[in-house]
Amino acid sequence: MATKNPLQLKYEESRRRLLMDRSVPGRMGVSLPPNDVPEQPMPGSDILRNEMDFPEVTEGEIVRYFSQLSQFNFSIDHNFYPLGSCTMKYNPKVNDEVAGLRGFTDIHPLQPESTVQGALKLMWELQEYLAEITGMPGVSLAPMAGADGELAGMLMARAYHLERGDTQRTKVLIPDSAHGTNPATATMSGFEVVTLPSDARGDTDLDALRNSVGDDLAGLMITLPSTLGLFDSNIDQVVKIVRDAGGIVYGDGANLNALLGRVRMGDLGFDVMHSNLHKTFTQPHGGGGPGSGPVLVGPRLLPYLPTPWVTRRADGEDETFSFTTPEKSIGRMAAFHGNFGALVRAYAYISTLGKEGIAAISDDAVLNANYVMSQLKDDYDLPYDRVCMHEVVLSARTLKRQHGVSALDVAKRLIDYGIHPPTMYFPLIVEEALMVEPTETESKETLDYFIEVMKTIAREARDEPSLLHDAPHDTPNSRLDEARAARQPDLRWRRQT
Ligand SMILES: *Cc1c(COP(=O)(O)O)cnc(C)c1O
């Protein structure tokens, strides 16, 4: 890499400077008109905060500052973003446009229902779409995120058992290939978690499952496809064993990209599931929201759905929509009606694609992941060598043993090639894991570029490992101390003394 001359380094340093450090006394970002009202005395100095610092910058400088900051960011609108289990696919702009219509943005959650029938109709139709897509008849759009949908689902499972007097059903089985939120949710809902091992193929170990079910079984939470990117080929057996033992079967369908139009959790016998609208059904996400994680149930849990739930009454041509509370509802997940803007975007997305478009998502998502897998399996370890679903879990185990290059080093080096790192060190059962989810919206050219870059990095690991240890090189900040960034975050500007 060419070394930078002092002037180039100075330029880079200037781009990293915070707004306060760009301040020069006397500079102004606005010009005010001459005062045309009488001057008033200032409040007493006891309530004036003299210690407050405001940056003094020109308008041009402040625009540059924020524009530069926005370029330090990375988003799906910038480049390829293969972050496994997060489904960073392209979000069509028409969805945002629809969600921004004044009829949607200018309504208030406390308005009388008769004045927001259009919004209620949209919610009802979205419930119907999701019910058809998943084969689960009951849908509540209230949960604000995937983990919130899980919480709703497991609270329903708890209410179901308690109502039947089954207070001894306290145990929830969770395969070790499940998403990390699953055990957290089961614990928060008051259950005791028992981890099930995966077998050599990456499926749920059926013998371990049979040995774990009994009178104390509350249910099972399974991520499908699993976080290994695999469709559990024992799923029929898994569902049957749990149901026969009186347990509730929970399906984590946060990422349905691989299943859309092919497999419905309802048809497989699941009692309850959630899906992330902000992953499967496109919303700009990352950085903490806003998301939406509708919870969907089969007949056993229908009476327990959280409120509100939109129902329709039809009388000839006339239809009326209203918020309803199911008979034995577990109550509210949030103050109002879920993240309405996210619901509008998902509705726009599903309506635009239609039935055939929805099925094409799974074709392309699975094809893309398998293409990446087939091209990279000689350069990286592939712990489970079988057809994958919407994502593929590779491993940098051999690179680490032979060249001291870790999954973290590979991920950081990808940034130098303009690619967002994949999910790393997850799932926990794969050593040096790199979890790649290409999604269905990427072109073959982009996938080929990614493949070439990954092969190049594997070569660099052999020939010049130090290049990877220090990566990324071409970003405003190079390799950070991640432990210190998490433990001693430096979030506030302080005057240098
Ligand atoms: C993202 C994800 C979740 C959690 O969803 P949030 O919206 O982040 O709460 C749960 N399960 C799986 C499989 C996921 O990928």
Image: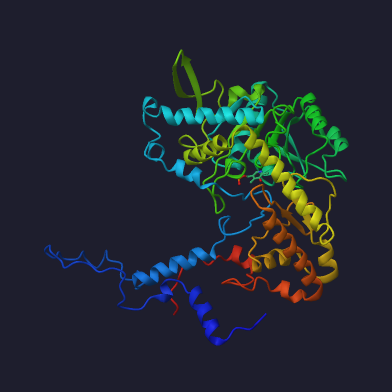
Q: Is residue 61 above or below residue 312?
A: below
- Give the camera-side residue of 178 and 319: 319
| Rendered view: 442 above or below 256 | below
In the rendered image, which quarter contains the C terminus?
bottom left
- Is residue 274 among the parts visible in the rendering? no
Residue depicted at 76% across the width and 30% down the height? 217
Of all residues, the one furthest to the bottom in this rendering is 6
**Residue 45 placement, left or right of 2:** left
| Residue 118 locus on image (x, y percent) | 43, 29
Ligand 1 falls in quadrant: top right
- At horizontal 72% and vertical 72% (from top left) the residue drawn is 469
Residue 456: image quadrant is bottom right
Residue 389 or residue 290, whichever sits in front: 389
The answer to whether one can see residue 222 in this image is: yes
In this rendering, the answer to whether 34 lies above or below 273 is below
Please tell me which residue is depicted at 65% across the width and 62% down the height of the picture.
Answer: 419
Q: Is residue 484 left or right of residue 376?
A: left
